[in-house]
Amino acid sequence: MRIKTYPYLLAILGSIVLFSACAHNYKVTTNLEQPVNELSICNIGEIRDELWSLEEDKPTLEHIEKFRSYLKEELEKEGVFKSILIMNPEASYEVTGSLHDFKKGSGAVRFFVGFGAGKAKLDTSLKLIDKKTGETLFAGNFKQTVGSWMESGDEIFRRVAHDFAKELKKQIKKLQKKK
């Protein structure tokens, strides 16, 4: 009897692994409902640290600046706007956000211990704002982790920036198809 249930158990476990690998590390909280002018300029604005002031792991200003530059790079790769600048008051759109959870992690601990020890973690919310109206056009909560010793802990910032730019581009294309 046990031998007959073994293939079913493997199929169920395989399905769980497959579906968990396909899950997004983000949740869109505001879908893009109006088209953006792709020939306009976008500003990468302030990314606020909203962590408790007594927390041990706090992102440095260098971390936040890297995150902003990764957002710029990823939006440029997706070709979402004509130009993307950091701190440009004349831009039509602005990307802003806040950090809700951050763990720097340790590459040495990831290397020597493994099993998730020393993992770097980031939980943030990001949004695209129309600067003329102040309206939030697109927003979401984005999470990433780095558990491999072969990757830098800063990779969490690049992955979140990639997820944001990719989802924004996907929503822009979806609106264009509706036309």
Image (cartoon, rainbow, N blue to C red):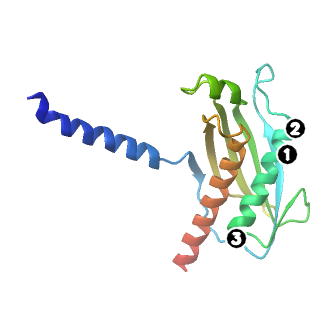
In the displayed structure image, the side of residue 12 where residue 57 appears, left or right: right
**Which residue is more in the foreground, 50 or 67?**
67
Residue 160, compared with residue 99, is above or below; it is: below
Residue at 13% of width from left, 32% of height from top? 3
Q: CA distance from mark 3 to mark 2?
A: 30 Å
Reply above or below: 25 against 129. Answer: above
Q: Secondary structure at mark 1?
A: helix
Residue 74: quadrant of the picture? bottom right
**Residue 130 appears at what percent x and percent y?**
76, 62
Residue in view at x 73 percent, y 38 percent: 99
Q: Which mark is residue 176?
A: none
Res. 169 image quadrant: bottom right
Mark 2 falls on what kind of element? Answer: helix
* Residue 133, picture quadrant: bottom right
Instruction: Give how far across and how far down residue 125 sits, in percent.
Output: 68, 44
Rendering coords of residue 131 (x, y %): 81, 61
Graded by Cα atoms within 10 Å as few (under 14), some (14 to 19) or many (20 or more), the crowding at tag 1 reads: some
Query: Mark 1 or mark 3, which is nearer the start of the sequence?
Result: 3
134 relative to 164 in the view: left or right:
right
Which quarter of the rendering shows the N terminus?
top left
CB under 8 Å between discs 3 and 2: no
The residue where tag 3 is placed is 36
Q: Nearer the viewer, residue 56 or 12?
A: 12
SS at circle 3:
loop
Question: Any mark on residue 65, and which?
Answer: 1
* Numbered tag placed on residue 61 in the rendering: 2
Q: Residue at x 62, y 45 (%)?
A: 141
